[in-house]
Amino acid sequence: MPADLPPDLWRWSARDLATALRTRRVSAREALAAHHERIDAVNPQVNAVVIEDREGARARAAAADELAATTPPEQLPPLHGLPMTHKDTHLVAGIRSTMGSALTDVVPTSDDLIIARLRAAGANSTGKNNVPEFAAGSHTFNELFGATGNPYAPHLSCGGSSGGAAVVLATGIQALADGSDLGGSLRNPAAFCNVVGYRPSAGIVPVAPTKDAWAWLTISGPMAREVADIALAMSVLAGPDPRVALPCPVDAQAFAPLITATPDPDARPLHGLRVGFTVDFGLGMPVQEPVAQVVIAAREVFDRLGAQVSDACPNLRTADEVFDTYRALAMALSLRELVARYPEEVKPEVGWNVERGVELTGTDLMNATAARTRLRAQVARWFSRFDVLLAPTAQVLPFDLTQRYPEQIAGQPMSSYVDWMRSCSIVSAMGSPAISVPAGFAPADPTATGSGTPELPVGLQIIGAHGDDVRVLAVAQAFEAATRHVDRRPHL
């Protein structure tokens, strides 16, 4: 690298790196070399990047540098030359795809929509990051590649299903990542890894190709180390697609002001914001005490920033029924043929969830539709009185890598592999945009003393009304500026 470049290029934000690439202060080949050096340095400890295309990535970087040599910076795409591994449930033309299973190990010939938009914006696809088998569950492990460790404590879970994506961000392998979220898969790993994960309102980043043009529960979205980089990603990802029937409630240009925004905490940037706060969502949801303590402390930050914070939450009593039914339907629609063909070769949680979807009756679907309608009305009424809702992202701290999922929380048993994710899944059922931002750290063992006890990340979920995505990101950005928890990086 040139002598005037800092040795820690891997620490740069996506915004700074993208600007340097477009202005030729950094070449695409140099950015790629830093990306590969970081993979070699840290990936053996965490197992986040599981598929690489180094030869293809080098060719694309060379082509990007040739384009930059003859093109004015303002005419280059916004992510020109930015290296990215992608979530291994997203198809990337020419790069091996597995979904965490040997049953779906292929080299696709076309891109999923989110990948196509990233590549059109100039991103250099370098490989794939790890996922749970078929993205089922919020713990990243599979029989094909093994488990992905938490960058703050590699013997613990990094969350999931966008777990590999969270880890490549936290470890500095790359500055921007793509993911997807059905019941928390963008938000939960962000909380576990001290990065930012954003679930947009349905329709803003269409999921295509798809078997259900009206699907609303599974969402594509970005992850990053800072909120402004989320806004950068949304400026290239947002927009309708003719293959998806859902309307796009927010234009891509609406995210642009957040890319350069610099909130001043001393100016009380959230003055007058109406904020609801909950730890248990009014449902008696169990939350580990260290998690609750960090989230309660985060509430005080909103008070200092001028917000009007109240203990308040929408009526979410029907949210579990809505999520459970529509999740089962989505799983069966996507995987029923494969599970029928290979019933003994998929993990039991996948088989169980697909079976639930196949067994749904007309009455089940009618009941869930009515419940969703009631839930939507209750949520809309609540957001007519409040601007955002604050809540824990995850109910637990990162758990042992060898566990399939937490079987109990605060003494309460969990009935299934998704039950411990309710703090995210019921928000999915609300149909709301939600972002997880770093909220602080808690000791892995609150009873232990001494410097040998690791501290683990905790995420705060900021939730808004459907279509109010820009406000959700702006609030998250103000909290981020006031706390700078995002600056605390793992030591690998």
Image (cartoon, helix red, strand yellow):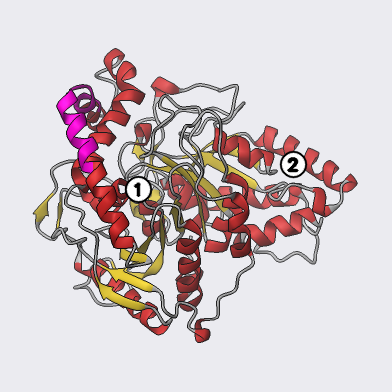
Is any atom of residue 169 visible in this view? yes
Q: Is residue 223 above or below residue 87?
A: below
Farthest residue, direction bottom? 266
Label 2 sits on a secondary structure element that is helix
Q: Is residue 226 above or below residue 81?
A: below
Question: x, y (%) of residue 244?
Answer: 49, 31
Residue at image position (73%, 37%) is 60
Q: Nearer the viewer, residue 41 or 51?
A: 51
Q: How many marks?
A: 2
- Quarter holding residue 350: top left
Check disc 2: other Cα within 10 Å, few if <14, some if 14-19, many if 20+. many
Question: x, y (%) of residue 348?
Answer: 22, 29
Kind of residue sitting beneath label 1: Gly
Q: Is residue 452 above or below residue 134?
A: below
Check disc 1: other Cα within 10 Å, few if <14, some if 14-19, many if 20+. many
Residue at image position (71%, 66%) is 6
Q: Is residue 362 magenta?
A: yes
The residue indicated by pointer 2 is 61
Mark number, residue 52: none
Kind of residue sitting beneath label 2: Ala
Question: x, y (%) of residue 295?
Answer: 30, 70
Task: Give the prevailing secondary structure in the magenta stretch.
Answer: helix
The residue indicated by pointer 1 is 431
Specify the segment rendered in magenta.
Answer: 354-371
Q: CA distance from mark 2 to mark 1?
A: 39 Å
Q: Is residue 137 magenta?
A: no
| 2 or 1: tag closer to the N-terminus | 2
Farthest residue, direction right? 70
Horizontal arrangement in the rendering, residue 262 relative to residue 155 (left or right): right
Label 1 sits on a secondary structure element that is loop
Residue at image position (88%, 47%) is 69
Is any atom of residue 400 visible in this view? no
